Every structure is written in structure tokens, then in C-alpha cells.
Image (spheres, grey):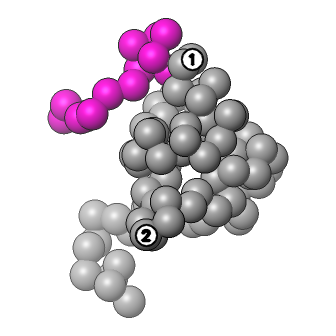
Amino acid sequence: KQRNKYTHLSKVKITVVDNYQGEESKIILLSLVRNNPDNKIGFLGTENRVCVALSRAREGFYIFGNIEILKSNSPLWTKIAATLEGFGSLGTSLRL
């Protein structure tokens, strides 16, 4: 496995959203990157799966993806983006 090369990731859980129902983590990094010529968002247009994805962090939550593609394909993501913008929590970079 590639992961074995990175010993600092030994305690990091990497999983897909479908396997995460009923679980929580202190910090979540969520990748919503979509890469296809039609800009389809797949499961990210399904409300219950979005709910699972957005409700599992206890202390820190960082989402990576193209909000414009998500908004153009889903009224739910339009609402989510407006909420994030209202809190000043939507940006184009993450300062480390």
C-alpha cells in the first residue's frame, strides 16, 4: 500500500462517506473534488449523503472542492454555500 510509506499517517482514518455513517471524528478533511467533462456531482447531489458528510466533525471541519460546480448542480449546495459565506467560512485557500 502507498499509505505504508507515510508512517505519520498511521493513526489517520481514511474512508469514503458511505462507510462513515454513525461515526464522528475530532477533525475531518472532506474532499468534494469532482473531475469530469460534464461537471456532474454524483452522490453530492443526494441530500442524505450530503448530511452524513457534513455532520461528522466535532471540532474542526475543512471541505475541499469547487463550490461553483456544486452550486450549479444542486439547490442544496447553493444554500450550504450561502451559509458558509454568511459565516465568512468560504475561501479559496487554507492558511497553515
Residue 73 sits above or below residue 19 on the image: above
Quadrant in the picture for the N terminus: bottom left
Q: Residue at x 44, y 39 (%)?
A: 68
Q: Can residue 52 be seen in this view?
A: no
Q: Is residue 31 left or right of residue 23?
A: left
Q: Label for residue 37?
A: 2
Residue 7 percent coordinates (x, y): 28, 72
Q: Is mark 1 on a helix, strand or loop?
A: helix
Q: Does the magenta stretch include residue 60?
A: no
Q: Position of residue 40 (x, y in %)?
A: 56, 61
Mark 2 burial class by Cα count in 10 Å: few <14, some 14-19, many 20+ = few
Q: Within the magenta stretch, is there residue 91?
A: yes
**At 19% across and 35% down in the image, what residue appears?**
96
Q: What stretch is highlighted in magenta?
A: 84-96
Q: Is residue 6 above or below residue 48?
A: below
* Amino acid at dot 2: Pro
- Which disc is residue 43 wearing? none
Choose mark 2 or mark 1, whichever is in front.
2
Instruction: Look at the magenta stretch and give its main secondary structure.
Output: loop
- Mark 2 → mark 1, Cα distance in angstroms: 28 Å
11 relative position to 47: left or right: left
Q: Residue furthest bottom?
A: 1
Is residue 22 in view from this perspective?
Answer: yes
Tell me: 29 left or right of 51: left
List x then y, in percent, for residue 28: 50, 44
Q: Residue 83 bears which disc, if any?
A: 1
Choose top left, top right, bottom left or bottom right for residue 24: top right
Q: Which of marks 2 and 1 is nearer the N terminus?
A: 2
Q: Residues within 10 Å of mark 1 (few under 14, many from 20)?
A: few
Residue kind at label 1, given as amino acid type = Thr
Q: Position of residue 79 (x, y in %)?
A: 63, 24
The residue nearer to you, when weighing 45 against 96, is 45
